Image: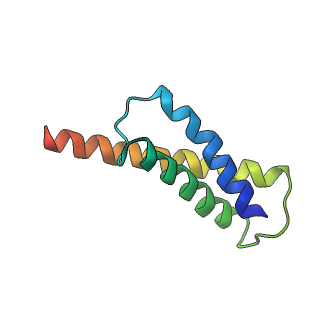
Amino acid sequence: MNLVVWVMMGIAVWHFAIFLPDRFWGGIVGAFGAAALGAVVVGLALAGGNITDTSIVTALEAVPGALIGLAACWFYGARREAAHA
């Protein structure tokens, strides 16, 4: 059940990507994938590999991962855009 919570929190954080210029690698769809993947990876690491017990902390574990995933996707996309210009 934790996996579902982490993905949903990644999607929730992804919605704030509209406030940034669209320099994400892969566009808004790439940002979606990066937020969801980052939330799952960091959430899984913080939970110690346990994906069965859910709590309010489970949702909060995903936020840093989603932000890290979005930041990595944005900086990589901005760098590629600058290289092509």
Residue extending farthest to the top is 19
In the picture, measured across the screen, residue 64 lies left or right of residue 73, that is: right
- Tell me what residue is drawn at x 49 percent, y 30 percent: 18
Nearer to us in this view, 43 or 52: 52
Q: Quadrant of residue 42?
A: bottom right
Residue extending farthest to the bottom is 49
Tally of marks? 0
In the picture, measured across the screen, residue 50 lies left or right of residue 33, that is: right
Query: Measured from the top left, where is residue 51 in percent x and y?
Result: 76, 69
Residue extending farthest to the front is 29
- Tell me what residue is drawn at x 61 percent, y 46 percent: 11
- Tell me what residue is drawn at x 67 percent, y 66 percent: 44
Q: Quadrant of the N terminus?
A: bottom right
Query: Measured from the top left, where is residue 9 in percent x and y?
Result: 68, 47
In the picture, measured across the screen, residue 24 lies left or right of residue 17, that is: left
In the picture, measured across the screen, residue 73 lies left or right of residue 12, that is: left
Q: Quadrant of residue 28?
A: top left
Q: Is residue 67 above or below residue 34?
A: above
Query: Measured from the top left, where is residue 41 in percent x and y?
Result: 59, 63
- Tell me what residue is drawn at x 49 percent, y 26 percent: 19
Name the colouring of the figure. Answer: rainbow
Query: Measured from the top left, where is residue 24 in percent x and y?
Result: 38, 42
Q: In which quarter of the image is the C terminus?
A: top left
